[in-house]
Amino acid sequence: MSDITFYELPGCPFCANVRSKLDELGLDYETVEVPAAHHERTRVRDVSGQTGVPVITDEAHGVEGMAESDEIVAYLEETYEKA
């Protein structure tokens, strides 16, 4: 089981940016595909308090429900990019 969980909606360009960064960094992560209808996104709402995606959690670093693709990419670069 991975420390990182990535909540995404297939076809979402913001999610694709985060997925690209996760893959570029060679990180192991679990993907949770959320339903298209916001009112059905209970799992991501429970994690982040909202229904938008992308969202990640990172148990190894105490990150619970980080949203906004630019913030997630910046976090991944700061935390996992090798100097």
Image (tube, helix red, strand yellow):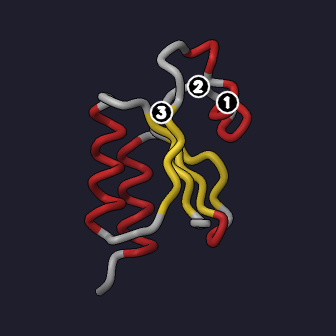
Instruction: Quote the CA–CA distance across marks 1 and 3.
Output: 10 Å
Compared with residue 24, is residue 39 higher up or lower down, i.e. above or below? above
Seen from the viewer's position, the closer of residues 21 and 69 is 21
| Quadrant of the rendered image containing residue 23 | bottom left
Across and down, in percent, residue 22 comes to 36, 60
Q: Which residue is mark 1?
A: 45
For badge 2, the amino acid type reads: Thr
**Local crowd at mark 2 within 10 Å, few (<14), some, or many (≥20)?**
many
Label disc, if present, on residue 53 of the rendered structure: 3
Q: Residue at x 36, y 31 (%)?
A: 10
What quarter of the picture does the N terminus occupy? bottom right
Distance of label 3 from label 2 (alpha carbons): 7 Å
Taking 26 as reference, is 41 above or below it? Answer: above
- Point out the tag, 1 or 3, that comes first from the N-terminus: 1
Amino acid type, mark 3 = Val
- Spot the residue most to the bottom: 83
Few, some or many C-alpha atoms within 10 Å of disc 3 (few <14, some 14-19, many ≥20)? Answer: many
Measured as percent of width and height from the top left, residue 48 is found at: 65, 38
- Which quarter of the rendering shows the C terminus? bottom left
